[in-house]
Image (spheres, helix red, strand yellow):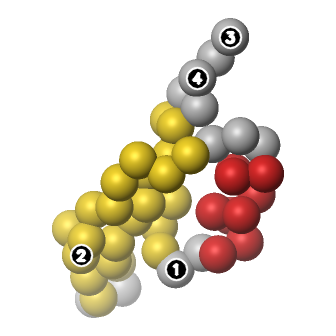
Amino acid sequence: MLSGIALPNDASVALHKRFGFREIGVFNEYAKKNGQYISSVWLEKALD
């Protein structure tokens, strides 16, 4: 399972990690939101 989270969002990252997701990468300043470039962190969790 994959999850992408716009940064900064420490609470959402912490919640995902609490449920077993692990960070696999960051897209730095790849998109614009409200006139500013944003980054996102991507996390994954293996389904058993």
The crowding category of the residue bearing disc 3, from other C-alpha atoms within 10 Å (few below 14, some 14 to 19, many at least 20), is: few
Of badges 4 and 1, the one in the foreground is: 4
Looking at the image, residue 2 sits to the left or right of residue 34; the answer is: right
Q: Point out residue 39 in the picture as x, y percentages from the top left corner.
A: 34, 72
Of badges 2 and 4, the one in the foreground is: 4
User: Mark 4–mark 3 contact, CB under 8 Å?
Assistant: yes
Q: Which residue is drawn at 64% across and 17% down?
A: 47
First in residue order: circle 4 vs circle 1: 1
**Residue sitting nearer the eye, 3 or 32:** 3
- Identity of the amino acid at label 4? Ala
The crowding category of the residue bearing disc 2, from other C-alpha atoms within 10 Å (few below 14, some 14 to 19, many at least 20), is: few
Quote the CA–CA distance across marks 3 and 1.
Answer: 30 Å
> Looking at the figure, which quarter contains the N terminus?
top right
User: Mark 2–mark 4 contact, CB under 8 Å?
Assistant: no
- Identity of the amino acid at label 3? Asp
Question: What secondary structure is found at the residue carrying circle 3?
Answer: loop
Question: What secondary structure is found at the residue carrying circle 2?
Answer: strand
- Which labelled disc corresponds to residue 32? none
- Identity of the amino acid at label 2? Glu
- Identity of the amino acid at label 1? Pro
**Residue sitting nearer the eye, 37 or 21:** 21
Q: Residue furthest bottom?
A: 35
Q: Mark 1 points at which residue?
A: 8
First in residue order: circle 2 vs circle 4: 2
User: Mark 4–mark 1 contact, CB under 8 Å?
Assistant: no
Q: Mark 2 points at which residue?
A: 29
Of badges 3 and 2, the one in the foreground is: 3
Query: In the image, is residue 39 above or below residue 18?
Result: below
